[in-house]
Amino acid sequence: MDLWFCQGFSEPGAGSDLASLRTSARREGDEYVINGQKIWTSSAHYADWMFALVRTDPEARKQLGISFLLIDMKTRGISVRPIITLDGDHHLNEVFLDEVRVPVTNLVGEENKGWDCAKFLLANERTGIANVGLCRERLDYARELASHTLQAGRPLIEDVKLHREIAVLDAEIRALEITNARFLLTESEQRRLPPFASVLKLKGTEIQQEIYQLLTRIAGPAGLERRTPAEPSLAAVNARYFYSRAASVYGGSSEIQKDILAKTVVG
C-alpha cells in the first residue's frame, strides 16, 4: 500500500524561524488534541497523511517543547485551502486543524524531542532541493534549445557570450555534483558537518535560478505564448522561471542558510 505524506512544518509567522511555531497539541488520555494552522503545505490536497511539528510544552524553550506527530488527513477537524502560485499552479495549501484528535501512538520519537527529527529531515530536504540532476538536465535542454533557436538566421548557440555563459554554468554544476557526492557518500562528513547541506541548498538554488533565467532569455517572446495543453509550447519555461524564485525561500531561506553556515562552519 502506497501512502502520500505532506509536511506540516511552516506556519504563518513561523517559516524560516520554524521553532516559533504555535500549532498546539494538548494530551488528553491516549490522544493529542491539535489546534493551529500550517501553510505552504505542498500536495496537502492529495496527501493521505501529514508529518507535523506541534508544540506540546508551551512553557519550554522554543526548540525543546516541540513534538513530531503523524496525522491522518482524513481525521475530523482538518480542512485544506488551496494557494495558487505565480506560475498558475496549485500545489501549495493552507491546512487548518481544529480540535483534531490523534492517537498518542502516532508520536515519532519522544515527546518534546521533535526538533531532533526536524533537523534530520531538513538536512535531507535541503540536499534534495539542490536538484543536481535537474540542473544538469535543464542545462542540456538550454543547449538544445539554443541550437534550434535562430537569431539573424544563425543558431543562438553560436553566440560567443552565450557559449561562455553555458560553459560557466556547466563548471558550476560539475562542482555541485562533486560536492553533493562527497556529502552523501562520506558518512564521516555527514556526522562532522551536518549543516553542510545548507551549502548544497544555497548553491543549488542559485544555479537553478540562473539556468531558468537563461532558458527564459533563449525562449524569448515564444515563452509568453499560451496554447492548449495538447499544443507544444515554451510557456512552461517561463512558468518554471517564476517558480524557481521561490527556491530562495522554501526549505529555509537563503539568508537562514548563510546564518547556519556562519555559525556552524565558519565559526
Image: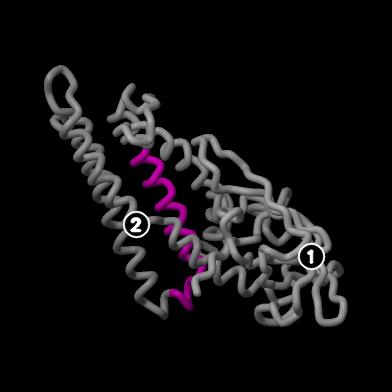
Q: How many marks?
A: 2
- In which quadrant of the rendered view does residue 130 lie? bottom left
- Residue beneath disc 1: 100
For mark 2, does the 10 Å Cα neighbourhood hold few (<14), some (14 to 19), or many (20 or more) residues? many
| Residue in view at x 62 percent, y 50 percent | 40
Q: Residue at x 12, y 19 (%)?
A: 153
The reply to whether residue 223 is in sight is yes
Relative to 71, residue 228 above or below: above
Q: Return the residue nearer the eye: 84 or 22.
A: 84
Residue 236 x %, y %: 38, 36
Query: Who is closer to the viewer here, 257 or 250?
Result: 250
Q: Quadrant of residue 251?
A: bottom right
Position above or below: 124 against 88: below
Task: Find disc 2 in the rendering and name its residue.
Answer: 132
Horizontally, residue 237 falls left or right of residue 9, namely left
User: How would you classify the magenta stretch by its main secondary structure?
Assistant: helix
Identify the element where label 2 is drawn.
helix
Q: Position of residue 12 (x, y in %)?
A: 72, 49
